[in-house]
Amino acid sequence: MSVSSAGYDLSPIDPERRAELARHLPAAVRHILFEHGTETPFCGGLLHEKGEGDYCCVLCGLPLFKSADKFESGTGWPSFFAPYAPDHLREITDRSHGMLRTEIRCARCDSHLGHVFPDGPPPTGLRYCLNSAALSFIPKGQPHPSP
């Protein structure tokens, strides 16, 4: 078992389990997670979430971001300046759409989450720009789901 710096199991999920977890998700969510889609700006369900808690991968439940690290970027997508734990994300060079960007994926299930840009606020200067559909919000005090 591979354990993250925050104590979570990062062992990859096998394809059969990944398909089983995705079966209950709407087609639009599966498109974002598996085909690197993007939801329409200003339409995501978590854009205006202000509660205390954690934002987890909608597929496998791995905690990805904390509400304390969320900020209003004005871009139309939930934005964070730091991940829950750096090893909970995988960064991939993305050259699609004639741009050079850094895609972020869940380190455990490899689902597409969004992108990270170097134009965020202090202290990191980073803007992790996420699809709401790729996340579930777990209010403070509630247990995180497991895969």
Image: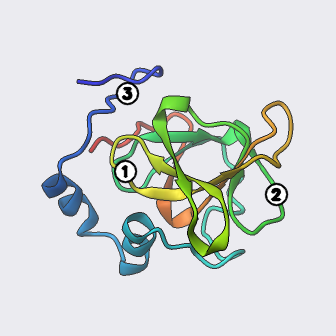
| On screen, residue 132 above or below 39 | above
Question: Who's the residue at 61% across and 74% down the image?
Answer: 97
> Which amino acid type is marked by label 1?
Asp
Q: Are marks 3 and 2 in contact (CB under 8 Å)?
A: no
Between 66 and 143, the residue placed more toward the observer is 66
Q: Is residue 41 left or right of residue 13?
A: right
Pinpoint residue 127: horizontal percent, then vertical percent: 74, 48
Secondary element at tag 1? loop
Front tag of 1 and 3: 1
Q: Looking at the rendering, which quadrant does residue 101 occupy?
A: bottom right
Pinpoint residue 3: horizontal percent, then vertical percent: 34, 22
> Which amino acid type is marked by label 3?
Tyr
Q: Is residue 19 left or right of residue 141?
A: left
> Which amino acid type is marked by label 2?
Ser
**First along the sequence among labels 1 and 3:** 3
Pinpoint residue 128: horizontal percent, then vertical percent: 67, 49
Question: Who's the residue at 69% across and 75% down the image?
Answer: 41
| On screen, residue 44 above or below 17 | below
Count the numbered circles shown. 3
| On screen, residue 9 above or below 48 | above
Using the numbered discs, state the Cα–Cα distance from disc 3 to disc 2 in whole angstroms: 29 Å
The residue where tag 1 is placed is 110
The residue where tag 2 is placed is 73
| On screen, residue 129 above or below 63 | below
Between 145 and 107, the residue placed more toward the observer is 107
Pinpoint residue 35: horizontal percent, then vertical percent: 40, 71
The residue where tag 3 is placed is 8
